[in-house]
Amino acid sequence: LEQKQEQDIELEKHIENLKAKLQSIKNAEIEIRALENAKREIEEIAYEVRNSFGRRLNEKASYYMSKITNGKYNNIVIDDNLNVSVNGRNALISSFKLSKGTVEQIYMALRLAADIIFENDTKPILLDDTFAMYDNKRMGNTMKFMAENLDQVIVFSCHTREKVMADKLGLDYHLKKLDWLVDA
């Protein structure tokens, strides 16, 4: 009888352990369902943001690209894998098939289009040797467009090409030359 009572006590302990494990499993299932719902919601929101923001970014970047290339490339296309192409006059051209200068123009258009993040609050554009891969025509078109359409552009360069082009185009600018002293 005592052995039977000890077995019953052991079985009750085992049953309690199983009940605790079962409750733990139920709690984990609830947490998993909550995480799956949260994941689904986040994916839906990300999709909406990507479609809304991505479309606006693409439209704005395409506008800038058209302006800085004088209409040669009027549409930037960014696919789901973030591959970039442009609409030329006759075909869609992958960025891998474009010159370095044109790719730099795409990057410029995308940087300028990022102003949609700030809406009506304009921020300065900071450029560091941005025109290094531009030929003079590209650089002139871009600088003229920026001078006519942007509030404040700060260009850092170790070259004088930008100054020469700004003078040639009659652009209003302020030059600040930074001289650095190096102790030997």
Image (cartoon, helix red, strand yellow):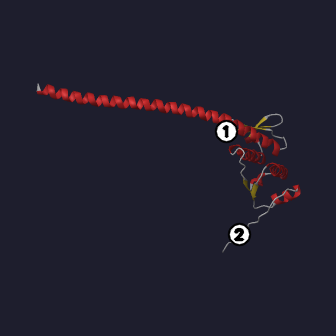
Q: Earlier in the sequence, mark 2 or mark 1?
A: 1
- Rendering coords of residue 133 (x, y %): 77, 52
| Mark 2 vs 1: CB contact within 8 A | no
- Rendering coords of residue 10 (x, y %): 20, 29
Q: Residue at x 81, y 37 (%)?
A: 88
Q: Given the current orientation, which residue lies at the most extreme bottom position?
A: 184
Q: Tell me if residue 120 comes above or below residue 16 in the rendering.
A: below
Residue bearing mark 2: 180
Q: Is residue 154 visible?
A: yes
Q: Is residue 78 visible?
A: no
* Quadrant where the C terminus is found in the figure: bottom right
Instruction: Determine the secondary structure under disc 2.
Output: loop
Locate residue 121 relative to residue 33 in the image: left or right: right
Residue bearing mark 1: 82
Instruction: Determine the secondary structure under disc 1.
Output: loop
- State the residue in front, 181 or 167: 167
The image quarter in which residue 173 lies: bottom right
